[in-house]
Amino acid sequence: MKYAYTLLFLIMVKSTFAFDIIDDVAATFKSGDAKEISKYFSSTIELSIIDKEDIYSSNQAGFILKDFFAKHPPISTKIIHKVTSNPSYKFGVILLVTANANYRVSFELKSNSSKFLLSQIRIEENKE
């Protein structure tokens, strides 16, 4: 009986403090690990980095992000905006501070069965 109560308690705690996908994506941007970010990619992704925009396969987008991080090593991230009210769509905006400049990164995630996948990433110079 003690085991059942413990299990029930753990389930309730996990559901109460469920990890937010937007926080997770922001953390991967802070790490600058394109391979880790690409784990969240859908099969194709709309990617816009500064002045280059197109729809890429997940592999191509991973290489482009890897190149971006090599030129602009991340220092920190700060979540500026989140939209999490829709059960099948999430949107986030982060401020990405790099060694060279500050960037505004917006991204959208769409539900694909049981998990959210990145369908769009926009990286623009932060004008503020």
Image (cartoon, rainbow, N blue to C red):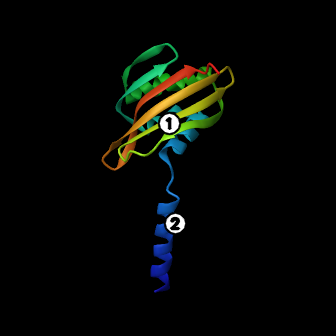
At mark 2, the secondary structure is: helix
| Quarter of the figure with residue 39 | top left
Q: Earlier in the sequence, mark 2 or mark 1?
A: 2
Which of the image's four quarters has the C terminus? top right
Residue 15, placed above or below residue 99? below
Viewer-proximal residue among 123 and 64:
123
Residue 56, placed above or below residue 24? above
The residue carrying pointer 2 sits among few (fewer than 14), some (14 to 19) or many (20 or more) residues within 10 Å by Cα, namely few
At mark 1, the secondary structure is: strand
What label does residue 125 carry, if any?
none
The residue carrying pointer 1 sits among few (fewer than 14), some (14 to 19) or many (20 or more) residues within 10 Å by Cα, namely many
Residue 92, placed above or below residue 128? below
* Cα–Cα span, label 2 and label 1: 25 Å
Q: Is residue 62 left or right of residue 128?
A: left
Callout 2 amino acid:
Val
Residue with the mark numbered 1: 92
Residue at left 37%, top 47%?
A: 87
Residue 43, image x, y percentages:
33, 33
Q: Is residue 91 left or right of residue 42?
A: right
Residue with the mark numbered 2: 13
| Quarter of the figure with residue 74 | top right
- Could you tell me if residue 31 is visible in this image? no
Residue at left 45%, top 80%?
A: 4
Viewer-proximal residue among 106 and 57:
106
Residue 5, image x, y percentages:
48, 80
Residue 12, image x, y percentages:
48, 68
Q: Is residue 114 left or right of residue 82?
A: left
Residue that lies at the very extreme toward the front in this rendered image: 85
Residue at left 50%, top 61%?
A: 16
